[in-house]
Amino acid sequence: WLKMAKCQRGQVAGMVPRMARCCRFRATSIVMLFLLIKMLFSLAFVGLNAPTLFGPRVFGSPASAIPQKAISDKAARDNRANQMNPNNAEYMASRGNAPLTGEQREAFAKKSALRKENEGNFENRANQLAPKDKLNLLAFEHFKEILRRVVPGMSLRKTGSRAKGTATSNSDWDYHVKTKRPMTIEQRDLVLENCRDEGLQVTCRKAFTVKPGSGAFIDFFPPNAEWHDNKVEVQEPGSVQFDKGGKNAVRKLKQKFPEKNGHDLEQLVLTIRREMGLSDRNDPSGEKRFQEAQRRLNNGEC
C-alpha cells in the first residue's frame, strides 16, 4: 500500500509540469493566431485604400490610387514654379499681363532661348579669360627663404585677384607678409641685397616684386612696414567674396578697360550687386552686372 501511494504521488508530481507546459503552448498559439488574423485584416485594408509599393493595387479602383489632395498640391507647386520662372509664359500672366496668344508664346520662348544662349556665350568668353598658368615655385621658395632669414617669424597669406577668382592671364600673384613687428627699412634693404647676391631679380616700392624667368610676377606685400605712408589701403585676405557671375563680370571689365585699376573694377561690381540686388539667382552669368558697370564707366559715373 505504501509503495502504491508513493508511486501515485510521484506520477501526480510529474504531471503538473507537463500540464503547465501544455497550457503555455496553447496560450502562445492562441496569441499568434490572433496576431496573424489581425495582420491579414490590415493587409486587406491597405490593399483597398492605398497604392502598393511595386505597382497598381490589386483591390480598389486604379483611378483613385493617388489621393486627390496630393495631386492638387503638386499642381499648385508646379503652377507656382512657372509663375516664378521668368522664362515661362505664366510669369508674365501672373503679373497682370494679358494671356499670351500662341504666336506670343512662341516669340517669348525664342526670346528666352536667345537670352540663355547669350548668357552662355558671355560666361564662356569670361571663363576663357581665367589664367591657366601656375606659380613659379622655384622663385617663390627662393624669395621666401630670404625673407625668413631677414625677418624671423614672418608668415605668408595668399590674397589679391588670384585668391578671389577674378584674375586674368595678366594678373600677378599676391601675398601678404605678416610680421610680429613693423618691417624696418634696414630689413627691406637687406632683403634686396641678398636677392641681388643670389641672382634673384626683385624690386620694391610698396611690395617686393619678384620677377621670375617664366610665369607671372609675384608680389610680397608687408602691410606693416616703415616705408608705407598713411595712404596705403590694406584689404584683408578673404574679406571680399565673389559669386560665379561676379567673377565673370570682373574678368570681362578688366579686358574691356585695361587702363582701369583692377581693385576699382572689383569694387564697382560689388556696388552694383548691392544696389541692384543682382546675384547668382537673377544674374548667374554676370552679364547684367557687366553691362551696368560698362554703362557707368562709359558715362563717367564712376
Image (spheres, grey):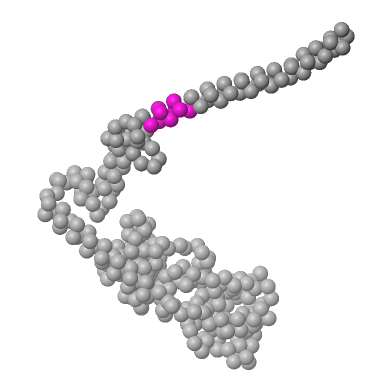
Estimate the x, y position of residue 97 in percent, counting from the top left: 17, 46
| Residue 43 rendering spot, x and y as whole percentages | 43, 30
Between 8 and 35, the residue placed more toward the observer is 8
Q: Residues in magenta?
A: 39-47
Q: Is residue 242 above or below residue 146?
A: above
Query: Is residue 248 left or right of 206 when viewed as pictured?
Result: left
Magenta part, dominant SS: helix
Give the position of the C terminus as an image quadrant. bottom left
Residue at 66% x, 20% y is 22
Q: Position of residue 55 (x, y in %)?
A: 36, 41
Residue nearest the viewer, comparing 118 with 164: 118
**Height in image: 36 above or below 228?**
above
- The answer to which image quadrant residue 52 occupies is top left
Q: Give the mark count.
A: 0
28, above or below 76, in the image: above
Q: Nearer the viewer, residue 204 or 133?
A: 133
Question: In this orientation, does residue 183 appear?
Answer: yes
Residue 202 shown in magenta:
no
Q: Residue pushed farthest top?
A: 1
Give me the residue at 40% from left, 27% from top.
45
Q: Please give the name of the residue rendered at 27% of the width and 51% of the height, measured from the top-left corner.
A: 85
In percent of the image, x 66 and y 78: which residue is there?
Answer: 148
Q: Position of residue 288 (x, y in %)?
A: 29, 62
Residue 40 sits inside the magenta stretch: yes
Quarter the N terminus occupies: top right
Most foreground residue, 115 or 29: 29
Q: Is any atom of residue 228 visible in this view?
A: no
Q: Residue furthest right?
A: 2
